[in-house]
Amino acid sequence: MQEPCPEEEIQRAEEYVGFTFPEELKALLRETNGDHWFLLSAERIISHVKENREIFPEYLAPDEFEEKVNRFVFFATNGCGDYYCYRVLENGKTDASAIYIWEHELFEIREVAKSLSELITKYYNDEV
């Protein structure tokens, strides 16, 4: 586990991503700034979004890119190119009522948990 994330880095990540992070994610970042594998640090959240914004527009039309890639807050990974994320609603608000796995080959999501603590528990029990 990493040291706590400074508040300024959380704000910088939110600004770069373009969406406000759910409070439970900000609370986790304030406790630990990632774990070098599953949970992304604020800096890695930014770098993954930057990479996605560079790679995926060449495979998708602009409206598809917005809907299938850019309207998610990615905060963890399974190490295979898929992300755990929150979905961003059409009104621009981040929906914290569910956490999804975003599968990069298909640009599909499926719900895997109702909260961050549930996701972490499931992840470390090999249930996701």
Image (cartoon, helix red, strand yellow):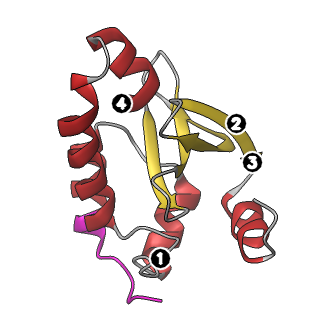
Which residue is the site of mark 3?
Answer: 112
Question: Which image quadrant is residue 62 in?
Answer: top left
The kind of residue tagged 3 is Val
Q: Find residue 4 and report its horizontal and vertical position in percent.
A: 39, 83
Q: Residue at x 72, y 66 (%)?
A: 117
Does 114 sit left or right of 5 as displayed? right
Q: Mark 4–mark 1 contact, CB under 8 Å? A: no
**Label of residue 110 in the image:** 2
Q: In the depicted view, which residue is nearer to us: 11 or 102?
A: 102
Q: CA distance from mark 4 to mark 1?
A: 22 Å
Q: Earlier in the sequence, mark 1 or mark 3?
A: 1
The kind of residue tagged 4 is Asn
Q: Mark 2–mark 3 contact, CB under 8 Å? A: yes
- In the rendered view, tell whether residue 12 sits above or below residue 71: below
Question: Label 3: how many residues lie within 10 Å, few (<14), some (14-19) or many (20+)?
Answer: some
**Label of residue 76 in the image:** none
Question: Label 1: how many residues lie within 10 Å, few (<14), some (14-19) or many (20+)?
Answer: few
Q: Earlier in the sequence, mark 4 or mark 1?
A: 1
Question: Label 2: how many residues lie within 10 Å, few (<14), some (14-19) or many (20+)?
Answer: few
The kind of residue tagged 1 is Trp
**Label of residue 70 in the image:** 4
The kind of residue tagged 2 is Arg
Q: How many labels, in total?
A: 4
Does 17 sit left or right of 3 as displayed? left
Q: CA distance from mark 1 to mark 3?
A: 18 Å
Magenta-tinted stretch:
1-9
Q: Residue at x 36, y 30 (%)?
A: 70
Q: Earlier in the sequence, mark 1 or mark 2?
A: 1
Label 2 element class:
strand
Q: Earlier in the sequence, mark 2 or mark 4?
A: 4
